[in-house]
Amino acid sequence: MNHFFAYLFRMKHIKRWGLMRNASEENLEEHTLEVALLAHALASIRRDVLGIPCDPERVAAAAMFHDASEILTGDLPTPVKYMTAELTGAYREIEHAAEEKLLSFLPQELCGTYRTLFALAHDPEVYPLVKAADRLAAYIKCVEELKSGNAEFRRAAEQTMASIRAMELPELTYFLAHFLPSFELTLDEMGLLE
């Protein structure tokens, strides 16, 4: 009996934003899908708009597994994760150990495939897009919380947007200009019901 997929399906039980009061709870499964969608979008912008070779499906696959270790570790709040260089390094070791533990729940014939997917998120060509998508998903969560009247996310939104702008990725700049404004609108304002 192999437990790998049963563990992956437990993503829905891992709560995110543990230090914050949430108007709408977010779990790891929701976050992972959003990051994969955004990573695919950023990779598509890179390829189709900017004309830079990129494989959106490869980037999306990496994003699907970018936080898989949190199934075993839980979601460590960002301020804690990056408090010191030592703590960040220690947490990366814990994440790697958790990934290896997850891989141990696979038949040997499949370990290579999923080890590659876990490693892909750290590939120098893929990592910036997955990281950008991760931050973008966090910012969109902040926007949604602020739309719900939850001022608890105001500072997180400011800090997250500053970190997004600091990345200086043309794909992100394009997304921010062409797609992000819609997230601040209501369904009526987007015109679906007209």
Image: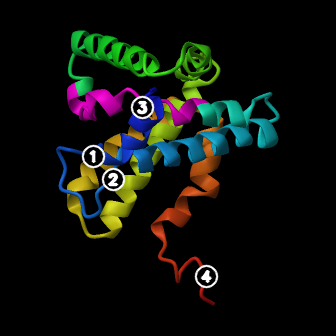
How is the model colour-coded? rainbow
- Which amino acid, by three-letter code, is at mark 1? Lys
Q: What label sits on residue 15 in the rendered view?
A: 1
Q: Position of residue 114 (x, y in %)?
A: 56, 22
4 vs 3, front mark: 3
The answer to whether residue 98 is visible is: yes
| Secondary structure category for the residue under label 4 | loop
Chain part drawn in magenta: 62-80
Between discs 4 and 2, the one toward the N terminus? 2
Q: Where 3 falls versus 17 (above or below)?
A: above
Q: Position of residue 81 (x, y in %)?
A: 25, 25
- Which amino acid, by three-letter code, is at mark 2? Glu
Whether pointer 4 and pointer 3 mark residues with C-beta atoms closer than 8 Å, the reply is no
Between discs 3 and 1, the one toward the N terminus? 1
Q: Which residue is mark 3?
A: 67
Q: Which residue is mark 4?
A: 191
Residue situated in front as seen by the camera: 129 or 30: 30
4 vs 2, front mark: 2
Whether pointer 4 and pointer 1 mark residues with C-beta atoms closer than 8 Å, the reply is no
- Residue 19: quadrant of the picture: top left
Q: Where 41 falls versus 61 (above or below)?
A: below
Q: Which residue is mark 2?
A: 26
Q: Position of residue 36 (x, y in %)?
A: 56, 42
Q: What label sits on residue 179 in the rendered view?
A: none
Could you give the CA–CA distance between mark 4 and mark 2, rounded to whole angstroms? 26 Å
